[in-house]
Image (spheres, rainbow, N blue to C red):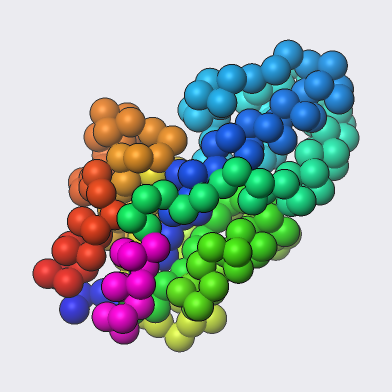
Amino acid sequence: MLYDAIFFDLDGTVIDSLQDIADAVNYTMRHFGFPLWEPQALKPHLGWGVGTLMKRILPQASEARREEILAFYKPYYAVHAGDKSRPFEGVLPMLERLKADGLTLAILSNKPDAAVQPLAEQYFSGLMDLSAGEVEGVRRKPCPDMLEAAARKLGVDLKRCLYVGDSEVDIDTARNAAIDCVCVSWGFRSREQLRAAGAATIIDLPWELVEIVEQA
């Protein structure tokens, strides 16, 4: 096979987490007296990490105010990140097949690591060789740092890794790491948005990834 490892984005790629994110955002907005958000309206603002999310949905707030809001949001979301989130249909069989094929699998997310770890353990125990979220000292995607660090930890050649995601953030991340990218159409961006962002390969069903990898 062409690839030794596959790195996955988390939100919108392997788990449907939109409602839990929206619930945590609105719990926070309500606490601070800001207008609430419909889940679908949040989609364009997701993918860069929660710090950027708050900048985008609260442009009127000062940096100090946003830090206060983040300090409230993060621990709440870490506790409630798995309330309604679930793997997308077909994702678990896809991961099981890729694992059986001998591939190294990892989740690399801009979501805070405190939320990534319990979600990965809850839904992907035994399937992921590494799960990592946002931590201090490692630049967020689309910088390639997380991918480079994961490749080192896992002992794989980054050039033989494939990246799978659902947004322009993921397309840019793979490009910055100089590796191939597969985008999924069931996440936070439409097929049209992915094409406009430069996606070369878009899949509509999880099993299509197995076919791509096994035929590469």
Predominant secondary structure in magenta?
A: helix
The vertical placement of 128 against 48, above or below, is below
Left or right of 48, for residue 93: left
Residue 12, given in percent of the width and then of the height, sits at: 45, 44
Q: Is residue 98 visible?
A: yes
The answer to whether residue 48 is above or below residue 54 is below
Say which quarter of the image contains residue 64. top right
150 within the magenta span = no
Q: Residue at left 79%, top 30%?
A: 28
The location of residue 6, given as percent across then percent down, is 36, 68
Position in image of residue 63 (x %, y %): 80, 30
Q: Nearer the viewer, residue 50 or 20?
A: 20
Specify the quadrant of the image occupied by residue 146.
bottom right
Residue drawn at (25%, 49%), measured in percent from left and top?
Answer: 205
Q: Residue at x 24, y 58 (%)?
A: 207
Q: Is residue 65 left or right of residue 9?
A: right
Residue 51 at what x, y percent from top left? 69, 39
Q: Which quadrant is home to the C terminus?
A: bottom left
For the N terminus, which image quadrant? bottom left
| 70 relative to 201, above or below | above
Instruction: Identify the residue at image location x=45%, y=85%.
Output: 155
Quarter location, residue 55: top right
Residue at the farthest left position: 215
Residue 146 appears in the rendering: no
**Residue range corresponding to the magenta coloring:** 92-102
Q: Which of the two residues, 174 or 167, is positioned nearer the viewer here?
A: 167
